[in-house]
Amino acid sequence: MTQQDRTLPKSAAYELSEDTPSNPSIRHTLGDVVAARLGRRDFVKAALATTAMAALAPTAFRAAEAAAPSFSFTEIEHGVDQTHHVAPGYDADVLIRWGDPVAGDAPAFDPMNQTTDAQARQFGYNNDYIGFVGLPFGSDNPDHGLLCVNHEYTSAEVMFPNYDTDRTPDEARKIVDIEMAAHGGSVIEIRKDAAGKWQVMPNSKYARRITAKSPMTLSGPAAGHDRLKTSYDATGRICYGTLNNCAGGITPWGTYLMAEENFHGYFRNKDALENHPEKINYERYGVGGEWYIWGQFEDRFDLGKEPNEANKFGWVVEVDITDPSSTPVKRTALGRFKHEGAESIVNRDGRVVVYMGDDQRFDYLYKYVSNGRFDPNNRRANMTLLDDGTLFVAKFNDDGTLDWLPLVYGSGPLTDANGFSSQADVMIETRRAADLLEATPMDRPEDVQPNTVTNKVYVQLTNNSKREPDQINGPNPRAKNSFGQIVEITPGDGDDHGSAASTWDFLVICGDPNDPASGAKWNAAISANGWFGSPDNAATDYQGRLWITTDQGSNWPKTGTADGIWAMETEGDLRGAGRMFFRVPVGAEMCGPRFTPDDKTLFVAVQHPATDGVEDFPGFERESTFEDPATRWPDFSDAMPPRPSVVAITKKDGGTIGS
């Protein structure tokens, strides 16, 4: 690996990519749209210029002097240091770390002598989404189950010793193969011991690693299309591996959904796009990011050698966790974009609705509605529900209503005249189809969490520093938005998630409530540590309470705190107040919150410790390397680099999380 082969550190590449909109059809929406919406919720009366909204004052949604909180834990303080912190009265135990065994025959982790074979049997890198399914399968057992964990990407600069030294092609290929094995996902069996501590069960029959080379199939409307055929697959129905799995979901029938997000960064040879058959398609997705050198060794990641390979990525992958020998399936009916999550809810009529965000500035919010009904007594029939249904994209209106626009070939502009000759084309080019339908460009829609108790839906809009004053719109009310917001959606037609109409409101507009320039909006009861920026993942516990994690990247100095998880009030007089519960070590991102069915364990994922924004960490103030990281969390051993890990949080007295 020569110096010219190296790319930006992956965390820096991700931030650069997310800060570069690829939507060419951004529509300008004037400030009066925002004024109408803010007035409906009794926000402050914002002073509006002719084409721009002035900064919102940091006042409250409502007074809250006598309100009773849903949470009674003592919150922690904002801050940043080398380790994690949890609320008093709780334990936060590391359950599994990068390199720990998954398969029963996996070797112990040896960071100085990593191999592809070992990594393919060990826990992968940068754990993100976490799903929990009770055992025996079909039960709600809170003390024994399967944990499903996504491995989003690799941070080579802190993974490999002497990474900045020149390498031979064979040495570089070895690193590439290890990186590919560290992607994908892990399924592990876990159980509480007699002391109430979670343990990974060795030699589990369910244990499984999925990697960037695992065989997969494609199903649904795009499967078999010519645009998915490659030199190794004349059928258009075969794929190898899954990439950049961010958030995800567990279906009502107990399968694991892996959402492929920033797949574009794995492909190289952008020069080939000049006369490429997929030029317009790939440019809309930013394909050819060249974050990795994989394409130097595998032709399928070279746009000139395999022109259709990138169309095999950007999907939602369904995994049957009851059978480790089963082949994962990419469900093309859910659309192709940079998926952040795939959380589902069973509608009142039995149809399954999957909510999804497309995580890039100025991209869109989606939902999929199955045609068939969920049958709790027929799991096999449920396994086809994600192949037959309708994908919708959201258009927000200034009066607090929301229209779900169907992405259906032949409907409206989705015709041959605009380059769509089938439903397969609409699914392969979901973004362009949504552009033509004039969906609402959003401030990086990340996790979208339906609440099965209240039936509300919460959309995390992380930030959008590229939005100009004449581009503000209803759910995206600020220009140069560094802090993000959370939008609450109420299904229309009597809580029907399948309805073509919904209503929307703000839960919070994030940022410092003491800084008028931030435009933040919180409940008046917000504490000094209860506010945050850049909401990312979300979870609801089994009581219906909402929990939010953050992903500030290198912008954490703007809030003065590392990322973490906050309990969020969504009902009553305290609606819009947060409380800080957990904080990650420096350079890390908070991901994957997931509760057990008794709400007595909260699993969280600590991703890429020691990478993001460490140049601003007082006393360190330089980029991290394997030999010189900003923190060696969680081992704090000179023999170990920083290791992404899953943490199990329990209350010391065995009680419910948040109480």
Image (spheres, helix red, strand yellow):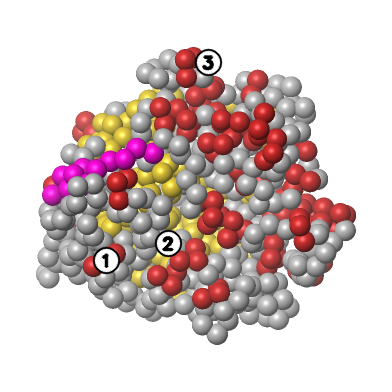
At numbered mark 3, what does the secondary structure look like: helix, strand or loop?
loop
Q: What residue is disc 3 on?
A: 421
Q: Is residue 410 magenta?
A: no
The three-letter code of the residue at mark 1 reads Ala
The three-letter code of the residue at mark 2 reads Thr
| CA neighbours of label 1 inside 10 A, class few (<14), some (14 to 19), many (20+) | some
**Which one is in front, 136 or 381?**
381
Examine the rendered structure and indicate whether residue 198 appears above or below residue 25: below
At numbered mark 2, what does the secondary structure look like: helix, strand or loop?
strand
- Hey, which residue is sitting farthest front in the picture? 50
Of tags 1 and 2, the one toward the viewer is 1
Magenta residues, as a range? 26-39
Q: Residue 49 appears at what percent x and percent y?
A: 19, 51
Of tags 3 and 1, the one toward the viewer is 1
Q: CA distance from mark 3 to mark 1?
A: 48 Å
Q: What residue is disc 1 on?
A: 517
Q: Residue 202 appears at what percent x and percent y?
A: 68, 59
